[in-house]
Image: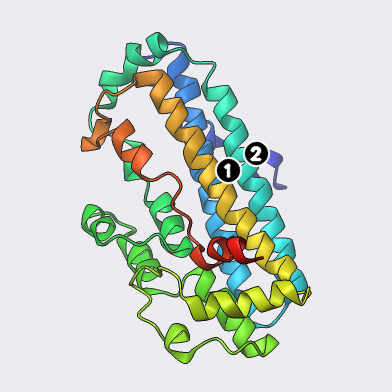
Amino acid sequence: MDMTYGDYLQLHKILDAQQPLSPEEHDETLFIIIHQTYELWFKQLLHESNFLRVHLQAGKESEALDTLHRMLVILKTLVSQADILETMTPISFYSFRTRLQQASGFQSLQFRRLECQLGQKNPRTLTLFTAHPAFESLSHDYEAPTLYDALLQFLSQHMGVAIPVDILQRPYSQPYTGDARVQDLLLTLYRERSPRVALLERYVDLDEGMQEWRYRHVKIVERTIGNVPGTGGSAGLAYLRATLFQPSFVDLWALRSSL
């Protein structure tokens, strides 16, 4: 029998994956689909992130720019999905919220992997997921170079930028807080109007897009449950607010004051 559209997309699995705990509550299906879609996009972002590394390691700047562009469009899609979720009223959400028990977006391992790849590394992240079946992938991302490390390696190996050796060989499990020497080198690229600036600016776009999605997520939570503690043991709004305005690519923001 020839493969069908449904066979190729495994639609029998996807369309059977929505199992509301409160079938009588109309909006729970929307809530499930939105979050399942988020996870699919997180999966694609991780896929593209790995592809970006491959291009940078090979010195393929044009391909890296294309991959970054796709990642940015995906992030905009994540942000725009908030418009759909906000059609669900707080009363509607509360009608099934207790059925979630300890389930929480705080437990999204894929999003934690994205955070690690972008440089947002927190030791507590690992302790929260030690029993998760995909813990090994998270642990790998925690110990691996970030996307910013990949950028600095690209500039050093393929563009002749004299990135300090101690930065290139730093302990990757430690958060990178910026370095004045690196900022000076990048600032020179900007002032010389180097073609490399396009790549640097796409990194800024990526960082900004991630921060935009975080902000939109915070506002959804605020308008839906206010200051009520989150499910899954999280602090809810207080925790999410603490994640705002924390750039991943510190050097690229710091040099703005000197352009």
Residue under label 1: 10
- Quadrant of the rendering where the C terminus is positioned: bottom right
Residue 236's label in the rendered image is: none
Query: Which residue occupies the extreme front position in the image?
Result: 258
Callout 2 amino acid: Gly
User: What residue is drawn where x is 25% and y is 37%?
Assistant: 234
User: What residue is drawn where x is 58% and y is 31%?
Assistant: 81
- Separation of disc 2 and disc 1 at Cα? 6 Å
State whether residue 96 is above or below residue 31. Answer: above
Residue 173 at what x, y percent from top left? 34, 72
Is disc 1 placed on a helix, strand or loop?
loop
Residue 26 at what x, y percent from top left? 46, 11
Any part of residue 135 in sight? yes
Colour mapping used in the image: rainbow
Callout 1 amino acid: Gln
User: What residue is drawn where x is 70% and y is 68%?
Assistant: 199
State whether residue 176 is above or below residue 205. Answer: below
